[in-house]
Image (cartoon, rainbow, N blue to C red):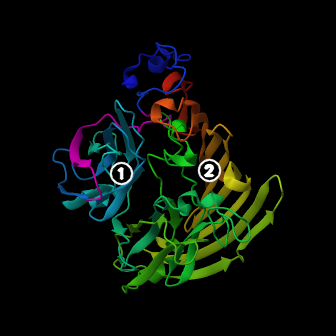
């Protein structure tokens, strides 16, 4: 495999550009570099570690792997970090496939697979799963599925092994502060512990399944003529309700899988941001903790606004993360504020003989607040969140030209006040997409696309900043291939690049990757 390609010292030492040992091929062949991303590895402490195998399976169909998990011995049960690692291999011909991993019903990983070369590829995914420590402290059933189809045409069998590595809390390394209870939302009604003092919902929201909701950002309403229709056009919002009342809003991330935009040659080596490790949308539901603490079952529902009625296409597995007041059996309080702006969902269709165009915007704001009388005094939590989107979709009749430029913004401020200065955490997230696909008279398909995943976060104690971070993960790709011909006649070419920058009060990480025709041509680390 090209994954064995030798790179210069820049890869190892973080010096200058890393040069490939061989000149990139003129076009894609039957093999290419193993998939990789510019994202940083999970940092781990230098303490005793224990490794447990969670799953080891070959996926040929839609039969889930089922096994069991037993906590490790020799690393205690209050760990400083827990790291999940998936190692996969596949060869032949296969589509991109979606997968999940559940431990005790809790979703700990949502992922997708790269498309393989004829000669085969290997890839891995690392994820910090310390937040699920409460689940890992006892024996649990394990279920994993990467739905797949293997036949005479699609020959790729997906072979994976997933492990957990536990790092002990010893010496100066302290146990991580993690939720006391993790509840998978596998039924519409849930009963929580009665002494909850912080509640966070995480939703692994993905538009998927091969239908139009996989490309929700391209949908148009009537009367615009386009292959994917929705009354709200491309406007989507992931919502959480508690007993029917809107309790959380969020912008979905516009995930692009490794067969996306009709051009797998874009993603063979560098996937789009988050494609291998789908990050959940998080909601601070602490203002509703007093209601949930009454000992009765409550309805917690997740939905995606904008999806046509009765249409499938979204997956929203959800976990509730709960921190408990160990000095109180019951924590009481009340929801003291709920203010919601009227949702704005606007679309404007402009027909033309040369080009069709849809402009879409959305805007929504929600503020909730509640107080809890805890063992350490009254604590008030205020959550203010606003989501906006703005996109322009241009296409021609027959969709031989199809282009989108879109931006989705998700801003949240959570303020916790009680004794002493208030603590405020402000997060500003922006997702961007700017892509164009064209099909020429010679059946040559070309896609050029830029994707961005950006986030700024600051923590304030009173008015004084105590921590900050800035993330910018940008992907750029340009690939072409000839349609409706045998594989060896596609004459595919493609270049891609990713730069992942993360800096702040915890340090700096900066890595850039570039590829051409499946060969890794640059690997630069600047921090």
Q: Out of 170 and 255, give the one closest to the viewer.
A: 255
Instruction: Confirm whether residue 21 shows in the render.
Output: yes
SS for dot 2: strand
Q: In the image, 143: left or right of 299?
A: left
Return the x and y of residue 214 as percentages of the image width and height: 53, 58
Which stretch appears magenta?
35-63
Residue 163 marker: none
Whether residue 41 is in magenta: the answer is: yes
Q: Any mark on residue 458, and which? A: 2
The correct choice, above or below, for 499 with respect to 234 in the image is above
Image location (x, y in percent) of residue 56: 22, 46
What quarter of the picture does the N terminus occupy?
Answer: top left
Element type at marker 1? helix
The residue at which mark 1 appears reads as 130
Q: Earlier in the sequence, mark 2 or mark 1?
A: 1
Question: Quick check: is 168 in the magenta stretch?
Answer: no
Q: Nearer the viewer, residue 497 or 114?
A: 114
* Residue depicted at x 79% and y 53%: 355
Q: CA distance from mark 2 to mark 1?
A: 22 Å
In the image, what residue occupies the spot 58% across and 57% down?
215
Residue depth check, mark 2 versus mark 1: number of the one nearer the observer: 1
Alpha-carbon neighbours of circle 2 within 10 Å: few (<14), some, or many (≥20)? some
Decide if residue 332 is in sight here. no
The residue drawn where x is 35% and y is 45% is 153
Q: Where is residue 429 shown, x and y percent of the image?
A: 63, 53
Disc 1 residue crowd, few under 14, some 14–19, many 20+, Cα 10 Å: many
Image-based side of 383 in relation to 323, left or right: right
Which percent across, then down, holds residue 344? 73, 72
Question: What residue is drawn where x is 48% and y is 44%?
Answer: 258
């Amino acid at each position: 495999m090209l994954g064995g390609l030798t790179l210069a010292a820049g890869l190892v030492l973080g010096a200058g550009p890393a040069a490939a040992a061989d000149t990139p091929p003129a076009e894609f062949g039957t093999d290419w570099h193993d998939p990789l991303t510019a994202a940083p590895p999970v940092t781990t402490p230098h303490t005793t570690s224990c490794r447990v195998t969670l799953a080891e399976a070959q996926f040929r169909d839609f039969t889930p792997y089922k096994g069991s998990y037993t906590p490790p011995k020799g690393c205690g049960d209050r760990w400083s970090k827990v790291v999940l690692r998936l190692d996969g291999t596949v060869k032949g011909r296969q589509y991109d496939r979606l997968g999940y991993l559940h431990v005790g019903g809790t979703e700990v990983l949502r992922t997708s697979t790269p498309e393989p070369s004829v000669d085969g590829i290997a890839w891995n995914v690392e994820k910090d799963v310390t937040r699920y420590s409460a689940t890992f402290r006892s024996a649990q059933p394990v279920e994993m599925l990467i739905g797949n189809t293997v036949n005479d045409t699609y020959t790729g069998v997906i072979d994976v092994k997933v492990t957990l590595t536990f790092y002990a809390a010893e010496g100066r390394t302290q146990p991580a502060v993690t939720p006391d209870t993790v509840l998978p939302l596998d039924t519409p009604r849930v009963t929580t512990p009665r002494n909850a003092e912080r509640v966070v919902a995480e939703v692994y929201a993905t538009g998927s399944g091969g239908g139009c909701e996989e490309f929700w950002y391209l949908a148009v309403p009537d009367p615009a003529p386009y292959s994917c229709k929705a009354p709200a056009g491309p406007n989507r919002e992931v919502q959480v309700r508690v007993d029917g009342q809107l309790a959380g809003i969020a912008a979905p991330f516009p995930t692009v899988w490794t067969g996306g935009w009709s051009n797998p040659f874009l993603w063979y080596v560098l996937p789009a941001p988050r494609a291998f490790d789908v990050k959940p949308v998080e909601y601070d539901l602490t203002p509703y903790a007093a209601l949930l603490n009454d000992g009765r079952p409550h309805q917690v529902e997740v939905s995606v606004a904008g999806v046509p009625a009765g249409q499938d296409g979204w997956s929203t597995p959800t976990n509730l993360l709960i921190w408990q007041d160990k000095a109180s059996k019951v924590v009481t309080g009340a929801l003291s504020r709920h203010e919601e702006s009227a949702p704005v969902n606007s679309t404007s269709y402009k027909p033309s003989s040369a080009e069709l165009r849809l402009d879409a915007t959305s805007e929504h704001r929600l503020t909730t607040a509640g107080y809890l009388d805890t063992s350490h005094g009254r604590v008030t939590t205020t959550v203010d969140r606003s989501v906006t989107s703005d996109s322009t979709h241009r296409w021609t009749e027959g969709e031989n030209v199809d282009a989108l430029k879109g931006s989705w913004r998700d801003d949240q401020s959570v303020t916790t006040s009680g004794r002493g200065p208030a603590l405020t955490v402000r997060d500003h997230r922006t997702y961007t997409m700017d892509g164009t696909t064209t099909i020429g008279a010679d059946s040559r398909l070309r896609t050029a696309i830029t994707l961005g995943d950006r986030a700024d976060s600051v923590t304030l104690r009173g008015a004084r900043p105590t921590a900050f971070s800035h993330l910018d993960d940008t992907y750029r790709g340009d690939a072409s291939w000839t349609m409706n011909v045998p594989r060896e006649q596609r004459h595919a070419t493609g270049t891609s690049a990713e730069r992942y920058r993360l800096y702040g009060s915890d340090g700096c990480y900066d890595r850039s990757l570039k590829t051409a025709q499946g060969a890794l041509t640059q690997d630069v680390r600047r921090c």
